[in-house]
Amino acid sequence: MLKKLGRKVNTLITKPFKKPKKPPPKPSSPPPPPLPSPPMSPPMPQIPPKNYPFLFPKVQSSVLSDPSRFFSPNLLSSPLPTNSFFQNFTLKNGDQPEYIHPYLIKSADSSLSISYPSFFHNPSFIYQIFVPDLTIFATDKTTSTSDKSHIISSYSDLSLTLDIPSSNLRFFLVRGSPFLTCSVTGNTPISISTVHAILSFSSNSSLTKHTIKLNNGQTWIIYASSSISLNHSVSLITSGGFSGILRIAVLSDSDPTCESILDQFCSCYPTSGDAVLTKPFCVEYKWEKKGWGDLLMLAHPLHLDILCKDYCDVKVLENFRYKSIDGDLVGIVGDSWVLKPHQVSVTWHSIKGVNEESYAEIVTALAKD
């Protein structure tokens, strides 16, 4: 009896301290299906080595063709300009006119056309009418593997050089030049055509100046660095082989002395032009020139307004003028201009003050802020 009683007491004492029995294990659930692998991302564009400038990746435009085909290969190592003054020479076929003051210039079919444009305007818009007054090309095209009408071999802030691959012609297109300048090499025969009728044609005794009068009222002059014999029909002028510089200009009707001024400065021609920051609050226009004598250029009204004669040696020819869409262009003799805008004081308050009738509107706007 004592043994049974002891076991019962022992059971009552130790039972609360025994570990509860583990519940039976639940049946294992099947493993979740594997997640689908993420889609392959496109390969990252290769980053050029650090010693090269960053270049944006090339894309194929569905609207415009690659403009780089109109640039010389030596220009393609640097970024090409955008919204430049000569961009029409690089868009699509490069055969749309571009305004190189004071002329509209068009390059097409291995030739270059020049127009002294008239204007059409109404209250809504104004535009210049391109008419190919004269078109210059090589009579006999040389062999060329290029299918392009022209190549831009160099450019700067104020100029570009245009080469015709199928001939020996190079054009220095400089903004503000009253002359179109063409360099001819290789004893190349030259042709000059016009959509107008040639009323008269005359040459000086040295065959270095030729005057053409057209039935649209214009008079054009062709200057040559050496003698060139020209023949003409109703709408075509031709020459034998020639090497040298040709300069072509239209006579402005603003001044009867225009021709004598062109005669005086026809021997000096610009090949490039840059806008440089050389002095505080000033910009300097500098032209590289060849030939001899002084350089004749044209300035529009803003240039004249801020031209600083204290910093540059120039002469303004007030009566030598060409019309342009920006206002009359005035002759300036000199290969360096310094332009200094008028200084405007910067103050906290309005320079002209505030109209009293605007007080309420300003107070309301400030209250809302």
Image (tube, rainbow, N blue to C red):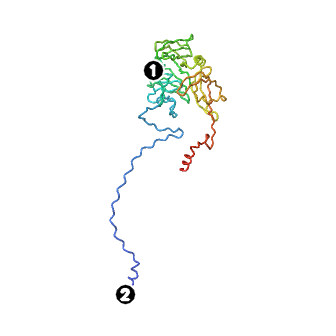
Q: Amino acid at mark 2?
A: Leu
- For the residue carrying disc 2, how many other residues have a C-alpha within 10 Å: few (<14), some (14-19), or many (20+)? few
Q: Position of residue 92 (x, y in %)?
A: 44, 30
Nearest to the eye among marks 1 and 2: give it. Answer: 1
331 left or right, relative to 131: right
Which label belongs to residue 47? none
Q: Position of residue 226 (x, y in %)?
A: 56, 14
Q: Position of residue 35 (x, y in %)?
A: 37, 54
Q: Amino acid at mark 1?
A: Thr
Toward the viewer: 315 or 170?
Answer: 315
Residue under the image location 40 percent in, 80 percent down: 14
Q: Secondary structure at mark 2?
A: helix
Which label belongs to residue 5? 2
Q: Secondary structure at mark 1?
A: loop
Toward the viewer: 84 or 30?
Answer: 84
Residue under the image location 35 percent in, 58 percent down: 32
Q: CA distance from mark 1 to mark 2?
A: 129 Å
How many labels were placed on the picture? Answer: 2
Q: Residue furthest top?
A: 205
116 left or right, relative to 334: left
